[in-house]
Image (cartoon, coloured by chain):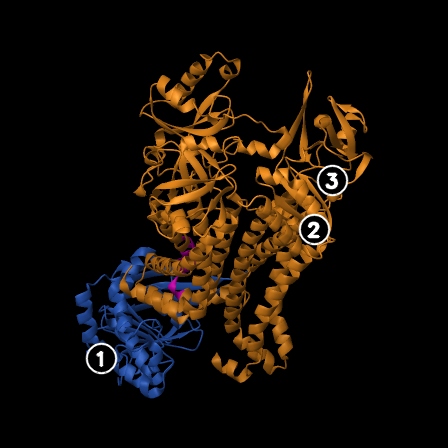
Amino acid sequence: MNITDIKIAFRNILKNKIESSISILGLGIGLGCIFILGVLIIHEHSYDRFIPDHKNVYRVVEDTDPRTPYPLAPSIQDNIPGIQDFFRFYQTNHVQIKNSGNRVIEEDLFAFADNNFFSLLNTKFKYGKAAVSPTEIALSEDMAKKYFKTQNALGASLNVKLKDNFLPLTICGVYENFPGNSTLHPEFVGNIELSEQVLGLSQRMFGEYGSTQNDYQNWDNNYFYSYLFLSPGTRPETVSSKIKNFMVSFDTEKYKEKEYHLQPATDIYLDSNNLTGNIYSRTGNANELKYYIGIALVILFIAILNYIFLTKAKILSRLTEIGAKKALGASNNIIRKQVLLESNMISALSLMPAAIIIIIGIPFINSTLQKTVGEEVFGMWQTWGMLVAVTLLTGTLSGIFIGTNISRTSAVVLLTGKMQRQQKSHKLNHSFLSFHFAIFIILVVSVFTFKKQINYGLTNFKAIDPNNVLVCELNSPELQKQAQVIQNELEQNPNVISTAGSSFIPPFNAFLPIKLRTEEETVRFDGLIMGKGMIPLLGMEIIDGEAFGEFKQDGRTNIIINESTALEYNIKAGDLLNGFTVRGIVKDFNAHSMHSLIQPMVILQQHPEKMRLLAVKTNGKDDKSIIETIDRLVTQISPESVSEVIYLTDEINQFYEREQNQAKLITAFSLLSISLAIMGLFGVVLITISKRTKEIGIRKVNGARVTEVVEMLNKDFLIWVIISVVVAVPAAWYAMNRWLENFAYQTSLSWWLFAIAGVLALAIALLTVSFQSYKAATRNPVDSLRYE
Amino acid sequence: MIQLKKIDKYYDAKFQRTFILKGVNLEVKQGEFVTIMGPSGAGKSTLLNIIGLLDEPSAGEYYFWDEPAHKIKEKQKVQYHRSHIGFIFQAFHLIDELNVYENIETPLVYRSVKGKERKAMVADLLDRFNMVAKKDLFPSQLSGGQQQLVAIARAIIGSPKLLLADEPTGNLHSEQGEMIMKLLKKLNEEGMTIIQVTHNEDFAQYGTRVVKLIDGLIREDYQVENRK
């Protein structure tokens, strides 16, 4: 490598502005995509590695649940050697907090932890310290800014509603925000004692069927993560077997059976998919990114192909330069190095567009894949290592492909132009275009199929009508008690068709397993707990027996089942099912998203004063005033409560959030792929036309019309696009069939999905080629002939 | 200096062998200025390319300074190109992306001559060719004659023993052609061995010897009498 080569490379890049821009921009897009995914992978594998001495940090897991009893961690530290330190952690959501303007805001990341939580996780306090009493609260910088507009909020008071009433808590500390690669990331951390207030609160949503215990900080209830910090050299297996020995020393039979093991803290993020109670941590999935990395690699590959083919086509006009150099004493090696230098320069220059892609792409990926890639990822050597490695690899690989042939060719061949003649006349190899357009077609078919399935999932509910249903949460005991009052008032409104209370309103995304237990057996059903009137409100159809009537104290033994249950157990209304009276049979309906099949179901009746939700079926004419009425009634009955009224259909939209996001991501990928395909096609058409200028001139002199010339040029390129359609359609069909297997109820893969994608690809190619071939065809033939 | 013994060059088509050169014997002594003449397709350029080690003979022996040049390997050829043989072409073959100065410098770079030394050598030559003012121009900004001048400068900067010129005046009008020929003659008088290919009878008179090639055979070989 020497200065002359760098000069030649630079001037070459500047001379062929269009080709160079296509190559640089294209490689930039490709590299940008792969970098984003690379950064994401590095981020995913960096979770919790910021914890000092993270190799000795473990979380206790009971069977498949990391939530453990309150007394566990302190007791085992006292009884088992090798446990240096521990902290317990509990987090709750939907905590209402009053801001300075007395507006109520709901917060989800409200945690309770032992005092050493922060020091063990190496999280520093900007001001103050952790909460030492149940009247104090520490919060993150972000929250300090949000609630107090300043970071130093020490001593201020925050009104927090943990259970039924707002409690004033004193700000005792403001800590640095947790990094994006921390599985635990609470915004509020209260003293562990304070958790007493909220434990068991979730039982309320089951109303009549929930537990009503008072004390949850005992061996019977599993709420807390227990993190153990082992002394160096202590083996986790030793500790877990000692925990087992310790548990056996209990008198209670139930405790003796408990099996605990230790999960390394650094495994929590990627390796917790088989755990059920991993609800306070961010989680990832090692497999999830596989497909996106595949697509990003394909995009990079397209960009590299563009570069290689364009450069190979363009290099034909530089053969004499290389030939002359050889005659002047340049060895094959020197030529090879020159080509490699140029390709690496192109790939280095493409880091500029790549940077733009990264800047736009990371927030996009964060929002669509719900990731938290932050600045910290750019502080890691792995990120920069990957950046340099991928750039060099791209430059070098393409350089090798471009240069090998040329560098070996002898000077005479290069100088006499025999090389050009060796290639079959003017027909360059455009096969790479097929690949480009095939990928585009597959991606477009995917996007359309995703949208079609999502739309199908939103509109094709069987035997249930979720439209025009307003839902309001009754989140205080007063509201629950007075539900009937609200209902009566709302039913005065002529635009309200009916109202009903319920604990759960289908279709909903969670599952509520209900076990009917007799002495001999326990049978598990898909379950629901509803109030009177909910079944007709949702347009569900009773095919035998009747719906729920007034709730009676013995009502707990009255159930409604669906057709599937009736068929499976061969029962009808009035019969007994495991000791419960079947009051009615409802036609099979979609109680969940289209991902899951309709299961045998049991519906229980809720006590009218213990409803969690209130549903209002309207005629859709004046929902606004109905919502206002609800808000007014809620404030009247329970002034401190805030309850947002939402449409049931909005909830349903969230069933397909994942698919919506996938569709967004694939749309982005398909836009990138088509831009690359257009750029590649554009470049190759440009080169071809410049090579065939003379031919076009001769044809025109001999009487060819503009249309005939345009047609002739189009033919050469469109054949590759047509091939791409032929290849892409079966591939897309196969891929989409596989994807649809995720759903129990699937839309059909209509022919028009493929037709649109194919026509789109053809139209784009046709436009790109025609634009340039028209310009070439309308040139004065005398000019083009003289040009030679 | 150069000895060709029974040089054949042919291409094999399906059932036919096409000879470009057939049994060419030629000896060129140091200090000669040989002009190879002949009609198109006679094999002139091929002969020149074989002498310049750009092409290989199909059969026969070629001795360069008594070394068997038909046996040397690709890698060694590069060394010959770097230090013994200079080329000029009909189409000049300057590197478009480099200016006059850099074009002339290129062979020195391949020979790993040090930067300072290079500067001095190029400056010297530019001075000699009266091109100092044009050193920053690019080939596309020069006339044909000037381009060929640069090409000659580039060919001789490494002081080769042998200068090969393939129709050096072919793309030039007569005035420029004459200028180039005078320069070549001067170089020859200074001791450089030159072999040129040309169609032009007049320009052959600048040399010391004429070799006429017809259909791959040497038909005439005579000393120039009234050298211009």
Q: Quadrant of residue A743?
A: top right
* Chain letter of the residue beneath label 3 in the structure image: A
> Could you give the CA–CA distance between mark 2 and mark 3, rounded to whole angstroms?
16 Å
In percent of width and height, residue A412 lies at 39, 66
Magenta highlight range = A397-412
Between disc 2 and disc 1, the foreground one is: 2
- As helix, strand or loop, the secondary structure at mark 3 comes to loop
**Circle 2/circle 3 CB separation < 8 Å:** no
Amino acid type at mark 3: Gly
Helix, strand or loop under label 1? helix
Magenta span: helix, strand or loop, mainly? helix
Vertical order, B147 against A422 (above or below): below
A183 within the magenta span: no
Say which quadrant the C terminus of chain B sits in.
bottom left
Residue A16 versus residue A543: which sits nearer the camera? Answer: A543
Tell me the number on the disc at residue A468.
Answer: 2
> Is A476 or B28 nearer to us in this picture?
A476
Q: In which quarter of the image is residue A86?
A: top left
